[in-house]
Image (cartoon, grey):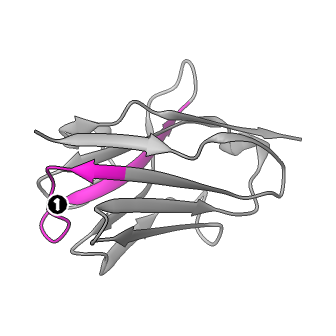
Amino acid sequence: EVQLVESGGGLVQAGGSLRLSCAASGLTFGDDAIGWFRQVPGKEREGVSCIYNSGKSTYYADSVKGRFTISSDNAKNTVYLQMNSLKPEDTAVYYCAGTRFSCSWYFRAYEYWGQGTQVTVSS
C-alpha cells in the first residue's frame, strides 16, 4: 500500500522560507517519481516540482525556479521541498504525489496523493 504524508506547511511572511516534507511508503525512489503540486480554491492543481531516478532528475515550474529546491533522502523515503523567498502568490495547499512512471506536469498522471498541507504567505 502506498502512503504519502506531507508536513511542514504554515504561515510565513513574504521573503521567508519553509521546508515541506513528504514521507512516502510503498514507492521505490529509483523507479518512481514524486511531484509537488499546489492548489488554490477555484483553480486546477498546478505542478511545482518533481524528482525522479533517485534524485538525479529534478524539474521546476518557471514560477518557482531559483527559489524552490526539491531533494530526497532515499534512506528515509522522504522528499523535501525547500521554499525560499516566498511570495504571497505561493499561498496554496501543497500536495505531494507519486507515480510509478517518470515526472509529469499533469496532475492526473499521478496515482497516489497525500492529504495536503497549507502554506500561507502574508505580504
Tell me where residue 89 appears, x and y as whole percent. 72, 42
Residue highlighted by disc 1: 32
Amino acid type, residue under disc 1 in the picture: Asp
The quadrant where residue 52 appears: bottom left
The crowd level at tag 1 (other Cα within 10 Å; few <14, some 14-19, many 20+) is some
Q: Secondary structure at mark 1?
A: loop
On screen, residue 54 versus residue 96, left or right, reads left
The quadrant where residue 119 appears: top right
Which one is nearer the viewer's eye here, 15 or 28?
Answer: 28
| Quadrant placement of the N terminus | top left
Which one is nearer the viewer's eye here, 48 or 21?
Answer: 21
Q: Residue at x 89, y 41 (%)?
A: 123
On screen, residue 27 versus residue 118, left or right, reads left
Tell me where residue 28 appears, x and y as whole percent. 14, 62
Q: Residue at x 28, y 71 (%)?
A: 74
Q: Is residue 84 magenta?
A: no
Q: Residue at x 33, y 66 (%)?
A: 51
Which one is nearer the viewer's eye here, 112 or 46?
Answer: 112
